[in-house]
Each structure stands twice: as C-alpha cells, then as structure tokens.
Amino acid sequence: MIGPHQGHANERANAHAQLCAQRVLLFAQSINHIDATGVETFSRLRQQLSSQQRAFWVIGLKLPVERRLEAAQALQPDAHFRRMVCDVDALKALNPG
C-alpha cells in the first residue's frame, strides 16, 4: 500500500521526469561515421520524439555523418527538430538572456 507521502513523491518525480524530457540533445561531435543501422535508428528516434511533441536537437554533426543523414532525408526541418553547429549554440539556446 502506498501512503499519502509516497504517492505525492511519485507524482513529483513523474512531473520532473516529464519536464526534463521536453528536449533531447544529441551532442554528435564524437560521431565520425554512421552506417545504415545508425541512420535508421536516428530516423526512428526522431519520429518517436516528434510524435511525443518533444524537441530533438542535434549538435556538432561532422560532415560525413551529416551527408549520410541528409541523403536519407533524416535532417528535414520541422517544428521539433533543430540542428546546431556547436555546443555553445545549444547552451545559449537553453539559457536565453
């Protein structure tokens, strides 16, 4: 049986998890290569996050990876997807002002 304090703690934890997961940031600077499975996984992740109304930010794609994802049309702009050149841009966007 869950007591009143445990239930409240669970509600707060769930609310915090939902707030924290509004954006998913992929810092991709260390990704040098992506194969077909990686492209498919990236595309599925992007679709899933978009269907959940969550933002997906990709930061620091290297040119070979970017070209491969573009060829697969996995980098098409939409309301939930954002590409950034470097982590400083992402940090500024997270902390405006």
Image: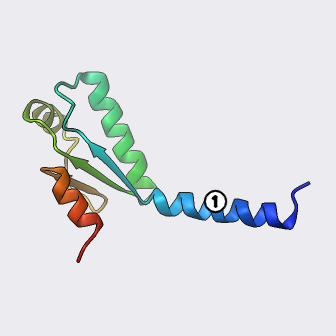
- Element marked by disc 1: helix
Left or right? Give the position of 75 relative to 56: left
- Residue at 17% from the left image edge and 59% from the top image edge: 89
* Image quarter in which the N terminus is found: bottom right
- Residue at 37% from the left image edge and 38% from the top image edge: 44
What amino acid is labelled 1 in the image? Ala
Is residue 52 or residue 93 the one in the foreground? 93
The residue lying furthest to the right in this view is 1
How does the figure colour the protein chain or chains? rainbow
Q: Where in the figure is residue 17, as x and y percent of width and height?
A: 55, 57
Q: Where in the figure is residue 42, as x and y percent of width and height?
A: 31, 36
- Residue at 85% from the left image edge and 67% from the top image edge: 4
What residue is pinned by disc 1? Answer: 13
* Image quarter in which the C terminus is found: bottom left
Residue 61 to residue 1: above or below:
above
The residue lying furthest to the bottom in this view is 97
Left or right? Give the position of 22 relative to 38: right
Q: Label 1 crowding class (10 Å Cα cut-off): few <14, some 14-19, many 20+?
A: few
Q: Where in the figure is residue 58, as x and y percent of width and height?
A: 24, 47
Residue 41 lies in quadrant:
top left
Left or right? Give the position of 25 relative to 34: right
Is residue 13 or residue 75 the one in the foreground? 13
- Residue at 56% from the left image edge and 62% from the top image edge: 16
Residue 37 lies in quadrant:
top left
Q: Where in the figure is residue 50, as x and y percent of width and height?
A: 38, 54
